Image: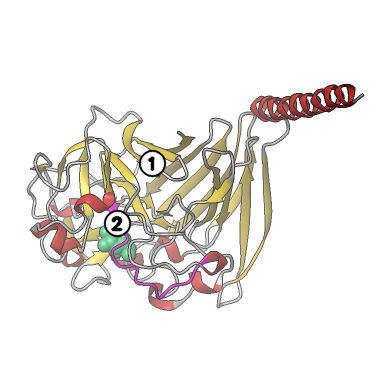
Amino acid sequence: MVRSWMTRGVALVSLVVILSSCNEVCKKSCSAKGKDGMDIKKSAFGKTPDGKPVDLYTLTNSHGLEARIITYGGAVISLKVPDRTGKLGDIILGHNSLERYVEPNHAGSPYFGCIVGRYGNRIGKGTFTLDGKTYTLATNDGHNHLHGGKAGFDQKLWKGEAIKGKEDVAVKFSYTSKDMEEGYPGNLKVAVTYTLNDKDELRIDYEATTDKPTVCNLTNHSYWNFTGAERDILDHELMINADQTTPVDSGLIPTGEIRSVDGTPFDFRKPKKIGQDVTADDEQIKFGGGFDHNWVLRKRGNDLSLAARVAEPTTGRVMEIYTTEPAIQFYSGNFLDGKVTGKDGKVYKHRYGLCLETQHYPDSPNRPNWPTTVLRPGQTYKTTTVHKFLTR
Ligand code: GLA
């Protein structure tokens, strides 16, 4: 009798185990098939201080990855990806409502998740000469021009358009920057498209045309923290596919030198914890208050190629960045100081986020020998950056 109950018990337990593992398999294969899981939704996200409505686009793929992106600044406000156990978590810094994005002087948002333009990073003394004409730009970083000026593309309201493809979902943002906006010549028509697919990639395509010669260097300024801002990013392991950087002066303007990373804190050719050298006794590190520099990517031509890989050991989350751009700015969140509280009450303290901004080199308009950022009427500016999410 006792025996038969025991046998039945074992059989029942085995059945439960079999059923639950079958369920696991079903879950995996159903989502792998990508059955009806891909979606894009539009909803309201408040109003700008001058009363204009802001929209939120929520893109999801069949594996549950979810990107939420707003028309204000084209900013990615959250991005949920799985950890190694399949648990989804939000891995970028930002806010759940508009108020903090629109605060003056970037008080609530030091460029969280936004599109940066017309020129990403710095232009020395806020001036450059093109075709013999000298242009004076807004200076908003000491004597220098940073991220497009006082009201760069991060503070513009973009027009959003949802696009549902066969293999992906996308939102296309458009904005026209007027001739002489922030001091730049030419009416610049810009389109930035964020696409999420079932290969767990978030792709950003940038396009621009102009009616007068101008300069253009667009990027995205997401701050990544794969722990969900539970702690700083110093244990994240980073690989940058680059042999050289462009050293800077104390105002973070490139000196013109292209320097090998060999034997310096800037060598990320093999994966290295960010914390290892972020406080190294090195002049460049001191100028940046940590890493805030431009790496010259190893690449031939303009094809999409691997620029960087970030891995976080406790969650197993990994991101690879592929780009058509020649360079990448790695910023280790040195200016974050705990003054901003973000989503879920998380306080964004020193080095709680890292940025990897694909780009042309800073101050290129003043460096004729560097890859050009000049855009002329008749030409189309086109760049692509792909963020691929994996686990290990
Ligand atoms: C970039 C710059 C940094 C800083 C941040 C925004 O990464 O290089 O110096 O301005 O943006 O705070």
Residue 42: where, in percent of width, then height? 68, 53
Classify the position of the N terminus by image quarter: top right
Does 114 lie within the magenta span?
no
Q: Is residue 306 left or right of residue 158?
A: left
In the displayed structure, 369 sits above or below 7; it is below
Give the quadrant of residue 207: top left
Q: Which residue sits at x=30%, y=39%?
A: 325
Classify the position of the C terminus by image quarter: top left
> The residue under label 2 is which amino acid type?
Ser
Does 339 lie within the magenta span?
yes
SS at mark 1 in the image: strand
Q: Is any atom of residue 107 visible in this view?
A: yes
Specify start and end residues of the magenta stretch as a single range.
330-342
Determine crowd level at label 2: few under 14, some 14-19, many 20+ residues with C-alpha closer than 10 A: many
> The residue under label 1 is which amino acid type?
Ala
Task: Tell me the distance, in whole angstroms, between the alpha carbons under discs 2 and 1.
Answer: 15 Å
Residue marked by disc 1? 311
Q: Is residue 2 left or right of residue 29?
A: right
Nearer-the-camera pick, 344 or 183 = 344
Which of discs 2 and 1 lies nearer the camera? The answer is 1
Q: Is residue 68 left or right of residue 263?
A: right
